[in-house]
Amino acid sequence: MHNHSVMSDDSRAKVENYCQWVHKRGVPIDGFVLSEHRKFDFESDYRSLEDEYGLRILKAAEVETDYGHVLVYGVNEDMYAAFDFSAIRLSLAEVVNEVARCGGIAVPCHPGRTRVGMLAHVRDRGPVEGVEVIETLNGGSRGTENDEAGGLAQEYGYRGIGGSDAHIVSHIGRCATRFADPIETVEDLVEALRGGDYQAIHTTGTEGER
């Protein structure tokens, strides 16, 4: 649900290498989402990799707001024109509303992280209306950050997803989201996220599970 390729300025991972790692190591995931920083990749076509490795590869974006970083699922041309994905101080309220208006869903990520997570901003300024889902498990979080994210979800009734936040190949699959129904398309993903029948999970020690 949260991975970066060489399309992001701080990642060294190639998409094909992610696929190879998942296959070689038996990482217990059926697919992954590429959420590049401050942009959406409209051009790359990963269907041949999907066929070769039996993985579903979907695309999203990670944008920066006044409440921290946010994963945006269901990006389309209308959404991309609605606000500047490259900006670093977007209004979270605007992002949530515009993403929903254009048929997607916005999910604040690593909320327990200093500066780039929403927890401290919520404590300072209160919650933002329209947020329904947050990333409660992040593979790059440290210390109590995931615990704090889980506490925030409980306090405000947010549903939770898990994501690896991978920037290098070996980090993919550290955390994931288990959906009740198969996810084949971005539209399936958005519908599932709105529906709520899913669970944030740690994949370590769960080889063979999906």
Image (cartoon, grey):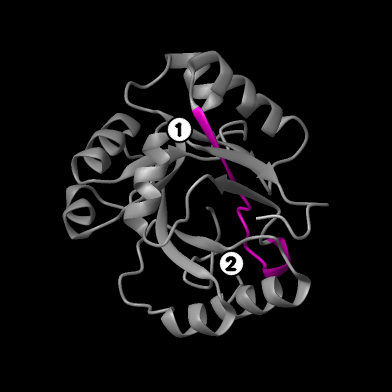
Q: Quadrant of residue 4?
A: bottom right
Q: Residues within 10 Å of mark 2 (few under 14, many from 20)?
A: some
Between the C-alphas of marks 2 and 1, the distance is 25 Å
Total count of labels: 2
Q: Which one is in front, 73 or 13?
A: 73
* Residue type at tag 1: Val
Query: At 37% across and 61% down in the image, what residue appears?
Result: 185
Q: Quadrant of residue 58?
A: bottom left
Which is nearer the N-term, disc 2 or disc 1?
Answer: 2
Q: Is residue 65 visible?
A: no
Residue 165 appears left or right of 134: right
Callouts 2 and 1 close, C-beta under 8 Å: no
Residue 17 appears left or right of 42: right
Q: Quadrant of residue 97?
A: top left
Circle 2 SS class: loop
Asked if 23 appears above or below 118 in the picture, the reply is below
| Residue 167 % position (x, y) | 62, 62
Q: Which mark is residue 11?
A: 2
Residue 206 appears left or right of 199: right
Circle 1 SS class: strand
| Residue 104 % position (x, y) | 29, 46
Task: Specify start and end residues of the magenta stretch as a single range.
Answer: 159-171
* Figure quadrant of the C terminus: bottom right
* Residue type at tag 2: Ser
